[in-house]
Image: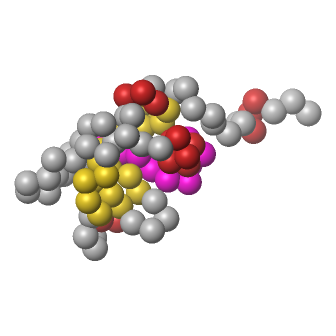
Amino acid sequence: MKLHEILAAELPDIDDSVKECVNMGEWLLFKTEVHKAGSEAAYYLKTSTGVFELSDRGEVLQEVAAGGDSLEIDELFYFSDVRKPDSLSNMHV
């Protein structure tokens, strides 16, 4: 699995609160090599309630039907210019 950092402006249709959830590790923004026939999804967003197909601008296209949890995560994305949690290794005691 490859990890990528992108700028928030690359996905302008995703709300800032969603971008923060991604950076906090609560939700996953990813790409997969396995695409559904006829799907135009550029990204997938896995939340606590489901998996959603996103356009190349971050617009929600549709929710992935049951079995979306079985999508393989090939590339995982975070936002380089959105708040991230402090790493334990960066904490000063």
At x 37%, y 40%, the residue is: 13
Task: Give left or right: position of 9 versus 39.
Answer: right
Residues 85 and 41: in front is 41
Quadrant location of the C terminus? top right
Instruction: Please identify the quarter of the rendering in which residue 77 is found.
Output: top left
Q: Residue furthest bottom?
A: 66
Residue 87: percent from the left, percent from the top? 70, 36
Quadrant location of the N terminus? top left
Instruction: Please identify the quarter of the rendering in which residue 52 is found.
Output: bottom left
Residue 43: percent from the left, percent from the top? 30, 44
Q: Is residue 90 magenta?
A: no
At x 31%, y 52%, the residue is: 60
Task: Give left or right: position of 20 versus 30.
Answer: right
Q: Is residue 72 visible?
A: no
At x 55%, y 26%, the residue is: 81
- Tally the marks: 0
The residue segment tinted magenta is 22-31
Q: Residue furthest right?
A: 93
